[in-house]
Amino acid sequence: GQQVMQIPQYQHVQEGEDFTTYCNSSTTLSNIQWYKQRPGGHPVFLIQLVKSGEVKKQKRLTFQFGEAKKNSSLHITATQTTDVGTYFCAGRASGTYKYIFGTGTRLKVLA
Amino acid sequence: DAGVTQSPTHLIKTRGQHVTLRCSPISGHKSVSWYQQVLGQGPQFIFQYYEKEERGRGNFPDRFSARQFPNYSSELNVNALLLGDSALYLCASSFRQDSTDTQYFGPGTRLTVL
């Protein structure tokens, strides 16, 4: 069945450093969504990518969807302590309604 | 507008018991999905309902069932609870069943099975 993996599993950075998490699907995706989950909280929608090669930016966050629509990345520039949390990608294969969540990358930012 | 609400917040059950979890979507949203999130893992898709009909089902046993009511609220039922059912159960609503629609998650119900 479809699998979605994320690397790294954990990342500790100093405040001000950059951070990137990578998402890889075993199958071609129709679209991919990114979520942030704070400790003890629930996933909060960040963005959706639909087109091959698409790049979207939200302030310090940059999201990319691969040309083959099987991988994606989230890059945070100049991390802040408010960026702490686990970042999940969730991909949907064509012809299905369900989203398969990735394994998540837990980010810790050291002040 | 209120966000997605779920009840109860926390629940403790023993093995073999039955549990019912409830979800109220954002006003105007017609689609509800249920996810199970075990500690340290990503959410796992259980069901999606749209206009009271099941539109998708994940790889969960028949002990898991759900339904959606005319007001678009939803219930998730789990029978014959196992220790491994301990998890955070999340409900997400969206306006349509269109899979490119944004999902809004509720705070979840933390289920502990002893």
Image (cartoon, rainbow, N blue to C red):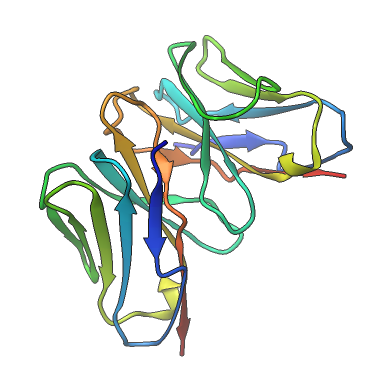
Q: Is residue B14 left or right of residue A16?
A: right
B93 to the left or right of A70? right
Q: Is residue B27 or residue A107 the one in the foreground? A: A107
Res. B89 image quadrant: top right
Q: Is residue B66 above or below residue B34?
A: above
> Which residue does the image show at 28% across and 64% down from the upper left?
A74
Q: Position of residue B102 (x, y in %)?
A: 33, 38
Query: Which residue sits at x=43%, y=74%?
Result: A82
Work out whether A33 lies above or below B13: below
- Image quadrant assignment for residue B81: top right
Q: Position of residue B11 (x, y in %)?
A: 79, 41
Which quadrant is the C terminus of chain B positioned in? top right
Q: Split into 4 quadrants, where in the image is the N terminus of chain B?
A: top left
Residue in the picture at 22% in, 67% down: A59
User: Image check: B83 left or right of B31?
Assistant: right
Q: What x and y, as percent, mark residue B61?
A: 65, 25
Instruction: Please tell me which residue lies in front, A52 or B5.
Output: A52
Position of residue A105 measured from the top left corner of the image (x, y, whole percent): 44, 65
Looking at the picture, does residue B78 appear above or below residue A66? above
| Image quadrant assignment for residue A50 | top left
In the rendered view, tell whether residue A90 sits above or below residue B14. Answer: below
